[in-house]
Image (tube, rainbow, N blue to C red):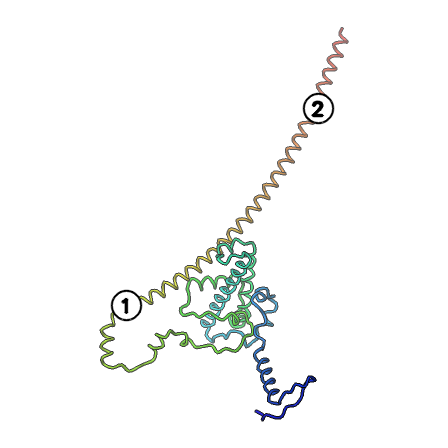
Amino acid sequence: RPKKMAGIPLFRDGSVKTEEDSYDVLLRSEMGNRSESPMMSATWEQEMEMDLAEVEGIVSHKERAPVAPKLTDARSARADFVFDLANLYLAKIHERETIRSGDPLLNMDHCRKSLSFVPERNQMWIKVTERCNVRFGEALGTLNVEQIKKIFGNRLARPKKNHIPSRPEDLLGLPSASVPIDSPSSYRTPDQRSDSVPAETPPSAKKIKLADSSTASTSVSDRVQSLLNQNQSSGDSMESLMRAFDRSDEITGLKEQLIEKDKEIDRLKKLIIKMSDSHLHQMDSAMDMFKKALRDQTAQDIINALQIK
């Protein structure tokens, strides 16, 4: 740092700024510029409305998910990617429906009743398919929307143990700050970390552990049972959500069939009215001919009667 020097007038009003003060100002401005580095430029709303044609431009080669050398590992990574990205889009759709309705307690059942839910969900599957093909198309081949739905359904039916959801910026291919990703061992609980570190125990502690082995095994079994119940409940909720999606598709198809039936009924009504009008016209023509013939016959009879007299 430079030594303090004499004051040098820098402004018209006579105020003096030393060289040390100028150095502090420059240092603060440089730190401010560093702190104001651009983060994620695109918001979630812009990402949901982003054109699919720009996906290749956003996701660079370095940001693509690494594909494992084994085919089974690559397929597992693709299933995890589809599962996390679909859940992310479903959460954003639910959030937008909540904002539109103004009800913070709006659940997914009410969201499915919205007119914009079905097209947004269809667009969601298209985007998931596009991004999955961008990341895994070269190694595993491209897929269509129905195959992506099947992968998502299989992933729901067989949830992966110890699965850590991906970050949103990794799923959507957005630029993010370089944050080191912890290894799976960093996600262990304090109890698990303490168990993983070997420690020397005195003979008295070993005796206590042997005496309390039954209690410890019971507590561990209770924890495992609670974790299994939580996983089963989460899997049941997602499975019920997918069943509700399928029912909404069936309801939409039934509505379309009902509209077609209504159109068919209207067409038959018009045909019946047209045929009744034609039959009525024919009946009127026949009646007129009968009246005319009757009048002619009556006139002829009158003439014959007068001639006889």
When asked about the image quadrant of residue 47, the answer is bottom right
- For the N terminus, the image quarter is bottom right
Q: Residues within 10 Å of mark 1 (few under 14, many from 20)?
A: few
Number of callouts: 2
Tag 1's secondary structure? helix
Instruction: Tell whether 39 sits left or right of 68.
Output: right
Residue lying at 47% horizontally and 63% vertically, measured from the top left: 152
Which badge, 1 or 2, comes first in the chain's sequence? Answer: 1
Residue lying at 43% horizontally and 59% vertically, measured from the top left: 237
Instruction: Tell whether 104 sits left or right of 162.
Output: right
Residue 156, how many percent across, how many down? 44, 62
Tag 2's secondary structure? helix
Residue 203, how many percent across, how many down? 23, 81
- Disc assigned to residue 289: 2
Residue lying at 58% horizontally and 83% vertically, measured from the top left: 28
Q: Is residue 304 above or below residue 71?
A: above
- Disc assigned to residue 218: 1
Which dot, 1 or 2, sits closer to the camera? 1
